[in-house]
Image (tube, rainbow, N blue to C red):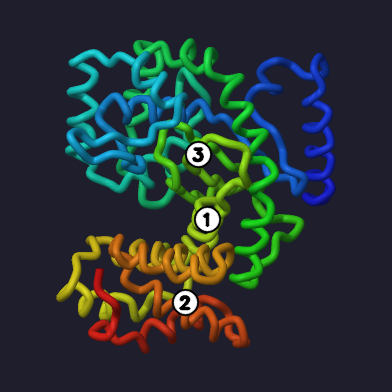
Amino acid sequence: MHRNLARLTTALVASLLLVPGLAPAQDWASSVYSEGGVELRIDERIFTLYAALNELGLDDAPVSRHDPLPKREFDPVRRQVRDAIVMTPDLRARFEAFFDQHPLPLRAYVAYTLALGDAPAFKLEGKAPAGSESLKGFEALLAEFYGAGRVKEILAKLTDGQREVLKRFRTGVDAPISDIRQALKSKAGDDAPQVVVVVNLLDGRGAAHGISMVDEVFLVVGPETAGTGPIDPLPIARAFARAELQPMAKGKGAALKGSKELVRDLQEFYPVGSNVDDWVIENLARTVAIKAVVSGDKAGKAMDDEVRNGYLLVRELNRGLAIFAKANKPLDAFVADFLREIDAAKLARP
């Protein structure tokens, strides 16, 4: 069966599953599908990871008050989980020791967790995603925390509310994914991996991780603000752009061949981290996302915000993408040439 027909069938079945009494409880509760065949999922593995991270101190979220104490905008589900989760001092110490020994970006931990099998075992299935190979053994900590922290029980009590969030997101995922494909001149194709959006209410609003696996592309995005307005397409677009562009950072092609010299010059003005390729790809993903889904004056502000966040290339890459839209070169060849033209001394500063 062709993938498009399979997706259409899956979406039709998913629509039928919305009718009470027609679906098994677990399937009905864990995912829904958009009209375009994108799956939106409550992922128990990601829930477990972020429940542990919150207990260990993760508090990334917009700040709504600074004084006398900072107040962060946590989704109600996140507040409930933070209140309910308990971690023993011994397990906490072992998590901290593992992080000390494996100081990788959070994105690597997200990718590794998505490669694991279902709870409660969290068994690694196949190879670990590129860049996360050293995290082997982390699954044992997740499995222990899942049991000791009563994660299954806590998640079960929150499933109905999270499913309502998925249903709200389902109308807002197809357009930004399509917009990114258009901006990158890529096509879905019958053999394209299934896109899965994991709405992670235990992270901050605006958070986005795009992880490309063998058969699936995972977009792990944070919550929206309360209300009935349209879903912000930017985190979804940014996650999908990162997943689509990630092969450039894995040595496939020579797209980032000129980035090391550029970043060496940039480091005179601003620290960009040790993983040069990942930093450049993140700059490009954020630029593509803004260009694809943010319009008018808001696009300029969004780019200024990214520069303030340390993504110094977005303005130049935006200029480059305008040229790429009219060019006949493949994206990787175009990026390779364009990076060599950027003058680090002339870039905007945070």
Q: Is residue 270 left or right of residue 139?
A: left
Q: Position of residue 110 (x, y in %)?
A: 41, 40
Q: Quadrant of the C terminus?
A: bottom left
Mark 3 neighbour class, 10 Å CA radius: few under 14, some 14 to 19, many 20 or more: some
CB atoms at circles 2 and 3 under 8 Å apart?
no
CB atoms at circles 1 and 2 under 8 Å apart?
no
User: What residue lies at 50% left-to-right and 65% top-to-bottom?
Assistant: 290
User: What residue lies at 29% left-to-right and 34% top-to-bottom?
Assistant: 71
- State how far apart marks 2 and 3 are (Cα): 28 Å
Disc 2 versus disc 3: nearer the observer? 3
* Residue 272 in view of the camera: yes
User: What residue lies at 33% left-to-right and 40% top-to-bottom?
Assistant: 64
| Dot 2: element | helix
Q: Amino acid at mark 2?
A: Asn
Query: Which is more N-terminal, label 2 or label 1?
Result: 1
Q: Amino acid at mark 3?
A: Thr
Disc 2 target residue: 318
Q: Position of residue 12 (x, y in %)?
A: 84, 37
| Dot 1: element | helix
* Residue 251 in view of the camera: no
Q: Amino acid at mark 1?
A: Leu
Residue 181 position (above or below residue 37): below
Q: Is residue 58 left or right of residue 248?
A: left
Mark 2 neighbour class, 10 Å CA radius: few under 14, some 14 to 19, many 20 or more: some
Task: State the mark number for residue 234.
Answer: 1
Task: State the mark number for residue 225.
Answer: 3
